[in-house]
Image: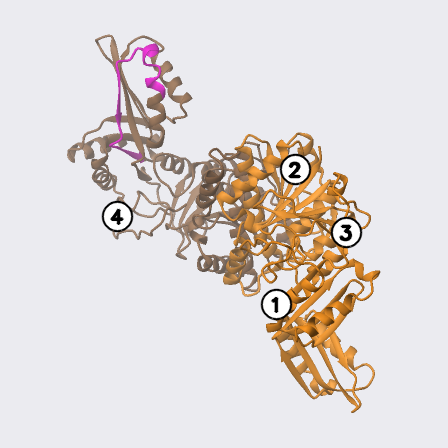
Chain colours: A brown, B orange
Amino acid sequence: MALIVQKYGGSSVADAESIKRVAKRIVDTRRAGHDVVVAVSAMGDTTDELLDLANEVAPIPAPRELDMLLSSGERISMALLAMAIHSMGFEARSFTGSQAGMITDSQHGAARIVDVTPVRLREALDEGAIVIVAGFQGFNRDTRDITTLGRGGSDTTAVALAAALDADVCEIYSDVDGIFTADPRVIPKAQKLDHIGSEEMLELAANGAKVLYIRAVEYARRHGVLIHARSTFSSSEGTYVLGEGMKNPREAEGAAAMEEPIVAGVATDFGQAKITVAGVPDVPGKAAEIFKIVARSGANVDMIVQNVSATGRTDISFTVPKADSAAALKALAGEQTEVGFQNLVHDDQIGKLSVVGAGMRTHSGVSAVLFEALSAGGINIEMISTSEIRISVVLRDTDLAEAARTVHTAYGLDGDAEATVHAGTGR
Amino acid sequence: MALIVQKYGGSSVADAESIKRVAKRIVDTRRAGHDVVVAVSAMGDTTDELLDLANEVAPIPAPRELDMLLSSGERISMALLAMAIHSMGFEARSFTGSQAGMITDSQHGAARIVDVTPVRLREALDEGAIVIVAGFQGFNRDTRDITTLGRGGSDTTAVALAAALDADVCEIYSDVDGIFTADPRVIPKAQKLDHIGSEEMLELAANGAKVLYIRAVEYARRHGVLIHARSTFSSSEGTYVLGEGMKNPREAEGAAAMEEPIVAGVATDFGQAKITVAGVPDVPGKAAEIFKIVARSGANVDMIVQNVSATGRTDISFTVPKADSAAALKALAGEQTEVGFQNLVHDDQIGKLSVVGAGMRTHSGVSAVLFEALSAGGINIEMISTSEIRISVVLRDTDLAEAARTVHTAYGLDGDAEATVHAGTGR
């Protein structure tokens, strides 16, 4: 008998039928003899609808009240889910973030978890109940106000509960079957991974893979929580995300331990734009000046390339999420005279390709395979950046899909069959 | 500077526009120098929509979870209202039932208030904030679970807050202008009352007047809360509901004190059905036997008439809300042999007319006016019942409107102009 935490996203509980399907899945887990704690998101588009309402009554909604408003979404889904389970003859109890002891700081809309005190959850489990917890929300002890955790909050709720309750596994359900060697919508031959290291998972998530949220993976790694990413629409196992020193549960069950592949996956990201600050005086401190301005605009810089110049002036290029680029451009344009650059170039027709693998630490020649494959395909590279376990290149966005397929093949990641792709966002 | 509690029902906050209108009204009260505490219902049909969802996922929703679900409705409206006020430049804070200290027993769906500990509301008021409280909901201290107060719960929330905070007045806003001498939809010449005694209000509410809920009026009477029933859609004053020994605030302002009218109003009720248990053995204890059966069926008996008979058998007729009559009939039919009656007659084509007035205690001849008016109009009376301050008669439902107009005129209640009737339910 294990303690299993499960997380279901908004698309898994979008309507009454979906809620009943999820309820059955939870009951099946209980029937198999396990204790179950569920973190659930708001139904379908509830959060967006509530946000629309908020914007109708107030141009800039007060953050405390916005959290009070948004937190009602999970209250609805969790109560319905508990009812559905109850009507199947199983005891189920729903708990809000504050009832579940999800203590956060007071940063409304993006609160950080500071403590988890699941006293009531333990009581309910001891009494044999299935526990349903509102994802995405918490409670600040000082202000006694409701908070929300921001994007990906329900994943984080699930992982934090798993850590606090010392659960055996945290199952994150979505509409995809697990973590793939690449996005199956881009590369049909992508294969589902049996498992992946949490560092690799973080790099993939940070570079375009959307199945798990970085924040939840980080929390899991820090607290030694085993994540199992799997599909709401299938009973087959998904992908285990293994922290340092963690055993793959399937090996423990007697499956043959395979040698780890050098490259875990290929990530594609169409969401970045490139900004070039051209004709910057080539004197010390100019790069710092530029990136201070960009940071103040709220834009999140990803890759940076600086061309050395012989003319006394240089070009600095960087990428930011497309949504941030207008703010960054405006901020830079406002300080053109102070910085002394000649002009700004904005390019949102780019795509980023990343190859991630913990094996890069110990194997040489990994980057050579990438560059050879792209060269053989006649694909031009515009920017390059690397980390210890990742190589990323920026390409024309029209080249990205073809480049990803070529590189996926070059690293021997192609599967025999085409992966099944479900509709939806995996949120 | 006064402390004013205001209650806005679902139709007053049905959409973003309505919420902004209500916000402006609250801000105007604050601008006039008063402290304001608001109890708000869920938006428009939210509660019904949530109930529908509950019934889709579970035929008999678990009561604890149903309360958790339904309580999210007021969370949405109160947060939106607080945001709207905030964006007008005023500090506003919303509080759930439990945050507001609305302590109830553990009867889910129909919880009774056992204590009100508005510590956080007082803090917020002291800090100059407008306080918004979720109507309809509370919190049980032993189970630490969310409860709801049942029908008319938001009125009760408002009155309970007014009592606990020692407010100067509790303003109950709806889509009608106040309490009328009769339902203006039935009697166009009905007049708005300047004030009414709480006992009279209770009799009117119990006999078909829908503006205020009995439970809230009872609570106000017990705790000395002054209710002011008025319209969301007009700035004119409504009707004050005065408890024992309470002064009419308008008299205090110098208005001439009028002699109290003998009859306060005429109530009409189309919602009752009549059941006749015919051929009951005329032996002691039979009536008790019958009404025990009816009570067990959950039906709420209103009027009872028993015809004395010379044949050893008697007929017992009583009225129940139409919604209860099927259950009562079924229960009685199931025990026909035990009780020994001959047959059951069901009649839902009846209407009840009630005349209410505290003056009946000290004035004779009040009932004579009623009977003469009905007789002159050729209207047949089927049942009669009286209390200290009320006379009710059951008539054919097709006669009820005409009878009410005739009686309204006979008691001198007709106004000069026709009352303005707004659409909606006043809930």
Q: Tell me if mark 4 has few (under 14), some (14-19) or many (20+) residues whose alpha carbon lies within 10 angstroms of its own.
A: some
As helix, strand or loop, the secondary structure at mark 1 comes to: helix
Badge number at residue A237: none
Give the chain letter at badge 3: B
Quadrant (top left, top right, bottom left, bottom right) of the N terminus of chain B: top right
Residue underneath mark 2: B36
Q: Answer whether labels 1 and 4 touch (C-beta < 8 Å).
A: no
The kind of residue tagged 4 is Pro
Residue B87's place in the image compared with B333, above or below, is above
Q: Nearer the viewer, mark 1 or mark 2?
A: 1
Highlighted magenta segment, given as a residue range: A331-355
- In this view of the protein, which residue sits in the foreground, B189 or B296? B189
Residues marked 4 and 3, same chain: no
Examine the image and state in which quarter residue B38 appears.
top right
As helix, strand or loop, the secondary structure at mark 3 comes to: helix
Badge number at residue A188: 4
Residue underneath mark 1: B401
Residue at the image point whose x is 73% and y is 71% from the top: B372
Distance from disc 4 to disc 3, alpha carbons, whole Å, reads 73 Å
The kind of residue tagged 3 is Arg
Quadrant (top left, top right, bottom left, bottom right) of the C terminus of chain B: bottom right
Give the chain letter at badge 4: A
Q: Answer whether labels 1 and 2 touch (C-beta < 8 Å).
A: no
Q: Tell me if mark 2 has few (under 14), some (14-19) or many (20+) residues whose alpha carbon lies within 10 angstroms of its own.
A: many
Q: Is residue B315 left or right of residue A283?
A: right
Q: Position of residue A109 (x, y in %)?
A: 50, 35
Residue underneath mark 3: B221
Distance from disc 3 to disc 1, alpha carbons, whole Å, reads 31 Å
